[in-house]
Amino acid sequence: MSTWPDAAHGPEATAYAEVPPVGEGAHDKAERASLGELVGDISAGLSTLLRQEVELAKAEARESATRAGKAAGQFGAAALAAWMTLLFLSLAVWEWLSSALESRGWAAIVVMAVWGIVAAVFAMVGRRTTRQIQGMPRTTETAKRVPDALMGNEEAR
């Protein structure tokens, strides 16, 4: 259960009255321990497992939130750049087209259609970026194993 090289040193060490001798199995311990000690060990193990699951969930949530924040910043920067480009380039193209077509109305419609296509492309790229956010895959996987571990079937999955 412990990720520490020596179970006597680490956060789990305080959960047990004593460190079991090397080679002692669960059956040997069950024969010499009282029911209260066994329940205490189970409770401590379950508590450690749940704490580890919560820590994993927090770490994955931070990672996903960081990626989502970066994507939001990229959307914001793209929107600002697109707005500035749209403003100045649209005015220039509109003026150029209105002299070529001799109609300010039709020139405005052409400029609007071009920027509508550009907006659709930005939306598709942003959608693809947000679909790459994975959520918490490791937490989901380990949480699925908790019921089997509680029943003693850790290798069931």
Image: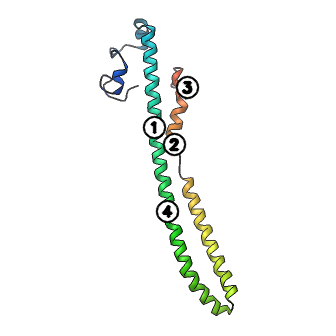
Question: Which numbered disc, 2 or 4, marks the residue that appears first in the sequence?
Answer: 4
What residue lies at 51% left-to-right and 70% top-to-bottom? 80
Tell me the quarter of the image containing the N terminus.
Answer: top left
Label at residue 147: 3
Residue matched to label 2: 136
Marks 2 and 4 sit apart, C-alpha to C-alpha, by 22 Å
Q: Which residue is mark 1?
A: 56
Element assignment for label 3: helix
Quadrant in which residue 83 is drawn? bottom right
Q: Secondary structure at mark 2?
A: loop
Residue 8 percent location from the top left of the image: 30, 22
> What residue lies at 55% left-to-right and 81% top-to-bottom?
89
Mark 2 to mark 1: distance in Å?
Answer: 9 Å
* Label pair 2/1, CB-CB below 8 angstroms: yes
Residue shown at the point (52%, 28%) measured from the top left: 146
Position in image of residue 39 (x %, y %): 46, 14
Q: Is residue 93 above or below residue 37?
A: below
Tag 1 secondary structure: helix
Q: Which mark is residue 74?
A: 4
Q: CA distance from mark 4 to mark 3?
A: 41 Å
Do the CB atoms of the residues marked 2 and 4 lie less than 8 Å apart?
Answer: no
